[in-house]
Amino acid sequence: MKNKILPVLILIFCMFLNSCSAPEHYEVRKDLSVYFSNADSVIESVRNSLRNHDTKIMIYYTSHRDNMQDISILVRELMQYALEETQNPTEGDYIFHQYGGYEMQYRYEIRNQEYFYEIEIIPDYYTTPEQEQEVTQKIQEILRDFDFKKNTSDYDKIRKIYDYIYQNVDYDLIHKKNKYYHLKSTAYGALKYHHAVCQGYAVLLYRLLRESGIDTRIITGTAQFPDGTTEFHAWNIVKIDDLYYNLDITWDKQMQTENYFLKSDQNFSSHIRDESYASDEFYQLYPMAGQDYY
């Protein structure tokens, strides 16, 4: 498969924080002397490249001084912004949870006392563009069969999607501990082979819900089993009216129950969120219901 190269991105650096205004959304790091003056457009371009599964992302920029010590930080933040939630079904959590990070390298040369930088970012995707095309086609088929109407309630959509995944995807015990087999954590693996681990369940649920107009996020953390053992876990929160509810289809499938369907935090105590999903800021953005949905 040929590498897809993102068109050249020209990044203009402001050398001093008070010398120019920051972009609308990119938060300037106060401990760095430089930032992308056109960061918002760059972030959008990188996001598009990630969504398209481009295998290389090339960034070019010119600076008036050596800032090699800041490149890794700037690229890390650039990627974090590009992977933020957008409510697009094929961006945000959908990419982040089917992606294993990236490799980065850079080169530069000095001409006329200016530094000309070339940064190469190589993302590690769990699926290929062809596999993602298959996912999109299958998602479209499923949604056509669901035939949701304008007056179909959010609850009925969630119920229908939950039942479909419950009936068609089994827990992948064979590959559970195989760290090299990433399809277990993807919507593709769940749809193509009908097997997935928690991350694959959560990603497929996320994609189907988003495509159906339901607001949802993927939450990661740890889950504690009745015997006291814990393991890394992923589940979803879904929005009905103005509040969010926990939904763990993986545990329901494994235990042949519906005990983890549309639950409040109070009745979901076996699940502990990672810090980034347990902050006051996150809860303000995604307020949880005080009781289960009935």
Image (spheres, helix red, strand yellow):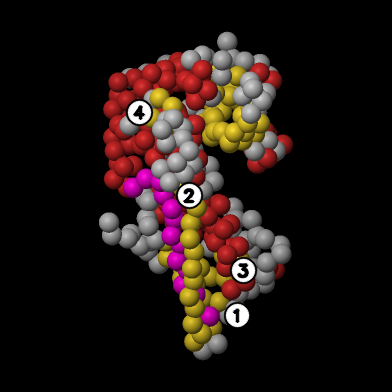
Magenta region: which residues? 115-128
Q: Is residue 154 visible?
A: no
Q: Nearer the viewer, mark 1 or mark 3?
A: 3
Q: Is residue 121 magenta?
A: yes
Spot occupied by residue 11 in the image (x, y as percentages of width and height): 51, 68
Choose the circle earlier in sequence order: 2 or 4: 2
**Farthest top residue in view:** 294
Numbered tag placed on residue 194 in the rendering: 4
Q: Nearer the viewer, residue 81 or 21?
A: 81
Q: What's the distance in space between the residues labelled 3 and 4, CA to CA?
A: 44 Å
Vertical side of 87 occupied by 260: above or below = above
Residue depicted at x 70% and y 38%: 279
Q: What's the distance in space between the residues labelled 3 and 2, CA to CA?
A: 23 Å
Choose the circle earlier in sequence order: 3 or 2: 3
Q: Which residue is mark 1?
A: 65
Numbered tag placed on residue 70 in the rendering: 3
Q: What's the distance in space between the residues labelled 2 and 4, CA to CA?
A: 22 Å
Numbered tag placed on residue 100 in the rendering: 2
Which amino acid does the dot numbered 1 rest on? Arg
